[in-house]
Image: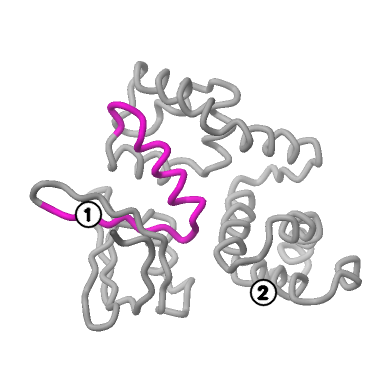
């Protein structure tokens, strides 16, 4: 069983709505299906370091071994929880995570937004009902966290920036920063977004990541600067 992998990116390609990479790990080539968001970042060179570490879900079938790669353990665990629901296969699970962010999924479960769930290709009314019912019990703590975040008014109206902040959280988690540290610096980063976008015209995921890491790597007295 493969839990995670670290290696060099050799190739990436798309087959219909499936996105793949080939990673060289100690002389072996591993073909891994990944999410579209990571695929696009690699394709457009938004990630300059082509040495990747991915959390892997290994699915064994009679005629094949399938590997699904994620940039964080949270994404992997979310994929596994969706996959555990009766009638939901690996491609539907990947389709959900390709179409919707984790926060959007949690919000859809919380508000019973069947229309949004049904917007994922391959999901009909019955499956959306089952997903909302079963995932609601699985993600009680995440639903509470979303409610707390909305109370703190950390939400940004621009969906593109929202997704960038969400990716930032997942990336910082994958870099082993603690959740309470990340939560502390997010309001500071969000306040900097307008400055980077309007005054400096320098808003990008890489700049937000560098800014967040600078805050996290400094002592707590620097957080309010």
Q: Where is residue 1 in the image (x, y as percent from the top left)?
A: 28, 59
Tell me the number on the disc at residue 139. none
Q: Which of the 4 image quarters holds residue 14?
A: bottom left
Measured in 3D between alpha carbons, the distance from the residue under mark 1 to the one under mark 2, in whole angstroms, is 34 Å
Q: Could you tell me which residue is drawn at 48 percent across and 29 percent down?
A: 135
Q: Could you tell me which residue is drawn at 74 percent across and 41 percent down?
A: 149
Q: Where is residue 103 in the image (x, y as percent from the top left)?
A: 58, 41
Which contiguous range is marked in magenta? 64-88
Mark 2 surroundings: few (<14), some (14-19) or many (≥20) residues within 10 A: few
Element type at marker 2?
helix
Residue projecting furthest to the left: 63
Q: Horizontal placement of 83 versus 164: left or right?
A: left
For marks 1 and 2, the one nearer the N-term is 1
Name the residue carrying label 2. Answer: 210
Labels in figure, total:
2
Q: Nearer the viewer, residue 165 or 90?
A: 90
């Amino acid at each position: 069983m493969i839990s995670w992998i670290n290696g060099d990116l050799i190739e990436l390609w798309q087959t219909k709505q499936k996105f793949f990479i080939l990673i060289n790990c100690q002389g072996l080539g591993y073909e891994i299906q990944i999410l579209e968001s990571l695929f696009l970042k690699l394709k457009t060179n938004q990630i300059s370091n082509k040495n990747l570490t991915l959390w892997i879900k290994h699915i064994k079938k009679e005629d094949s071994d399938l590997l699904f790669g994620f940039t964080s353990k949270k994404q992997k665990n979310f994929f596994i929880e969706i996959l555990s629901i009766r009638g939901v296969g690996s491609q539907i699970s990947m389709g959900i995570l390709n179409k919707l962010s984790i926060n959007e999924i949690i919000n859809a479960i919380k508000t019973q937004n069947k229309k949004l769930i049904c917007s994922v290709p391959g999901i009909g009314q019955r499956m959306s009902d089952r997903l909302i019912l079963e995932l609601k019990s699985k993600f009680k703590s995440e639903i509470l966290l979303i409610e707390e975040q909305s109370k703190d008014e950390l939400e940004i109206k621009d969906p593109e920036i929202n997704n960038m902040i969400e990716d930032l959280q997942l990336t910082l988690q994958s870099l082993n920063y603690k959740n309470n540290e990340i939560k502390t610096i997010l309001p500071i980063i969000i306040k900097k977004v307008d400055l980077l976008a309007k005054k400096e015209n320098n808003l990008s995921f890489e700049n937000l990541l560098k800014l967040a890491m600078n805050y996290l790597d400094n002592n707590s007295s620097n957080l309010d600067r």
